[in-house]
Every structure is written in structure tokens, then in C-alpha cells.
Image (cartoon, grey):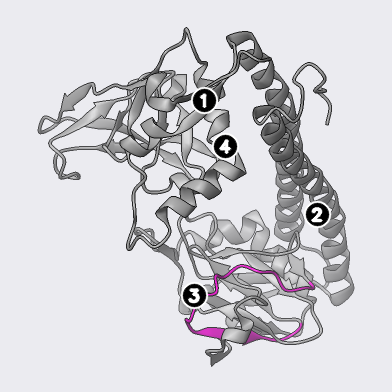
Amino acid sequence: MSDWRHVPAGKIARQRREIVRLEPGTGYRTMGVRWYGKGGYARGFVTTETVKAKFLYRAREGDFTFNRIDTHKGAFDVVSAELDGALATNEFPLYEVNEEEVDARFLLLNFQRSEVLRQISAMRAGSEGRARWKEADFEAWVVPVPPLPVQGRIIEVIGAVENQITALDAEADSLLRLRNAALGDILSRGGEGWSSAPLSKVGTLGRGRRFVKSDYVHSGLGCIHYGQIYTDHGASATRTVTYLPESFRGSMRLAQPGDVVIAGTSENVEDVGKAVAWLGDDDVAVHDDCFIFRHDLDPKFVSYFFASPLFHHMKRRFTSETKVVRVSAANLNKIVMPVPPRDEQERISGMADAMDTQVAALRAEAERLRQARVALLSGLLDRTIDIESAKLEV
């Protein structure tokens, strides 16, 4: 193990600039790199009418790439086969890795380490605006380079953990789809004693009482990042969660116990209208982009209605799809909601709750493995864990 080297990334990776000049009337497939290790993704097609750039750069499978703006958020990846040939702007530099010295997947692992991301973030501290971690920064960054067989074993060990995480996430997603399908079937069929009415007749939809108070910044339930709702799990929450930075000084609202909080904006149509029942004992801070629905029904039942395919089918008529997707209170109030007797509401929410509990357990195990992966990766690369003794089971 003494033959590990530490070299600048620029010694093992060379920037590749395959320039593609854009021609009028032609569409070009583009790519980018997402935050938090989510990797490369297709950004859609562009033309000379939709971008100002006169040329872009061709990505090739196996290229190492990163997002210059969001490197500190883990925006690194190796270009996949699906993105081979896509074009990237200069915000996503492309590097050809010397395969005789390093596996691009191993290089990627170096830049997934939490301590490395903290160091990159510290380099950017104090910079105004959207500071960039540029090509020179990457090329000067010193990385550990063990022999290729050792790199391969580390990739294998970390990959085994990632496969377990992927399987757990897939099982949780499958259960959620099953839950939503069951909700859609039950709510569409209805039953004896059921009624239906627009939301405006079932309860009151509003914004709640406004306040601006920094004390609530770290103790709120609500929406941020275009309406994503943070909850304990499922369709209800009983405790507050941290979701806003200390710098936040915007306006917020107060939701009461039993209120259902509904996302009014999102980056995509699927997330608009996501809802959660607040079941805590006290009022809770809610982001200003949320709606608050006050009613006399079972709170969990109401929030599960907003999770159902029935609601998502109806809301599409009223959702404006611009850069930020929005739904108005006036249009939400037009949504017709099925209203079963109270005991039936509780039975339906109990069924959905049971499935959500299983989902929460799977998510918790996946998160445990993610934390184990962080520690394992750090130990393998700083050599406090011997790769020969590392187990494939965590």
C-alpha cells in the first residue's frame, strides 16, 4: 500500500474541448450536472434562438465533469453512455482521464468526500454572487492515486453499498406508487354515505397569519426550493424540521394544529399541490409560498387526498407551467374533493399511514447506509481503513 501517490488532478486528467458551432435551425441535445451527487442529466434541446452561445462543447462517455458554480454542493460526475454526444456550456468543463493511471470513477469518489466538499466551500467563502470553482482549481487539486487494482477494489466496495441504497430507495418508491394507486382507486369509487364538494365548500384555503420573526427560522415546517415540503415522513408531521438558513429574513405564516399545508409553487408540475397535515401541539411557521387549508375533516385524510392520482389529474387543468410552476388559491378552490363519513376518512388514512410507515423504515435504512458510505469512503481514501479488510456488507 506504500505505492499510493498524491498528484494534482491536472496531471492525470486533460481538459478536452471538442467545439460544436451552433447553426440556425438545428436543435442540440445538452447536459448538465446536478447537486448532491445526483450526477449528469439531460437539459433538453437548445437552438440559436434559445441560447446566446455561438458554440458548445461535445461530451463523451467517460469524461470527468463538474458544475463550476455548484462544485461545493457535490456537482461532479462521469459522463454516462446516455449522455454521450450531448453538448455542455463552459460551466461544465470536460476532462479526458488518463486511463493508465486512474479510473474516472475513482477520481469521482475523491470529489464525493464530505471533507473535500467542505474544503472547496471554504475556498469560495467570502466570494460575492455565484462564485465559480474553475478549471485551474480542479487541475491544482491534489488527489490520492493508488494502483489501478486498488482503485478497482475501492470502486467495488463503495458500489456494493450504493447498490443497497438504490435497492432500498426503489422499494420505497414502489410502495409509494402502490399507496397512491390504492388511494386513487378508493377515492374514485366512493361509497355509501360519501359526498363531494369543491374545496371552497369543504374548508377555508388561505395563507394564514403573516409574521416576520427570525426565531422561527430554525423551527418551521414549510416550503422552500419552489415548494418542496419537508416532513418527518408521509402525509403528516408532528415535529418541526430545520429547512431555512440563518440568513433567511422573508415573510412566513402560521399554521394551526390540524391545518393542511399545501405547496403553491414548484420546479415541476408533479410537486405543485403536495400537502402535509400539521399534527403538532402548537402553531408552526410555514413558508409564504404555501397555502393553508383549514377544515373539519380528518387532517391525514385531507393530505392523502392531495397525494392521490385523483387530485393530480384534476389540478393539471389549473396549473401554469412556466419556469416556476404555480397554482392559485382560486383554482385550488375549484378542485372537487370526495368526502366520506368520518370513520371512513380515518380508515383510509390509517391504510395509507401503514404503508408510509414501511416507506419511512426503508428511507431510514437507506439514510443509515448513506452515512456509512460517507465514513467508509473517507476511511478508504485516507487509508485509515485497509481495503483488504473492508467488507462488502455494511
Q: Amino acid at mark 3?
A: Ser
Tag shown at residue 250: none
Element type at mark 2: helix
| Nearer mark to the viewer, of 2 and 1 | 1
Q: Amino acid at mark 1?
A: Leu
Labels 2 and 3: the sequence-earlier one: 3
Residue linked to disc 4 = 112
Labels 4 and 2: the sequence-earlier one: 4
Q: Amino acid at mark 4?
A: Gln
Residues in magenta?
A: 238-257
Q: In this picture, is 194 found above or below 1?
A: below
Residue linked to disc 3 = 247
| Nearer mark to the viewer, of 2 and 3 | 3
Residue at the extreme front of the image, as rendered: 2
Is disc 3 surrounded by few (<14), some (14 to 19) or many (20+) residues within 10 Å? few
> Is residue 227 in view?
yes
Residue linked to disc 1 = 107
Q: Main secondary structure of the magenta part?
A: loop
| Nearer mark to the viewer, of 4 and 2 | 4
Pick the residue in front: 112 or 88: 112
Q: Residue at 53% of width from left, 73% of height from top?
A: 332
Q: Amino acid at mark 2?
A: Asp
| Residue 236 place in picture, x, y as percent | 76, 68
Asked if marks 4 and 3 touch (Cβ < 8 Å), the reply is no
Tag shown at residue 356: 2
| Residue 347 place in picture, x, y as percent | 88, 65
Q: In this picture, is 6 found above or below 149?
A: below
Element type at mark 1: helix
Q: Residue at 74% of width from left, 20% of height from top?
A: 387
Asked if marks 4 and 1 touch (Cβ < 8 Å), the reply is no
Which quadrant would the N terminus be assigned to in this image?
A: top right
Cα–Cα gap, marks 4 and 2: 30 Å
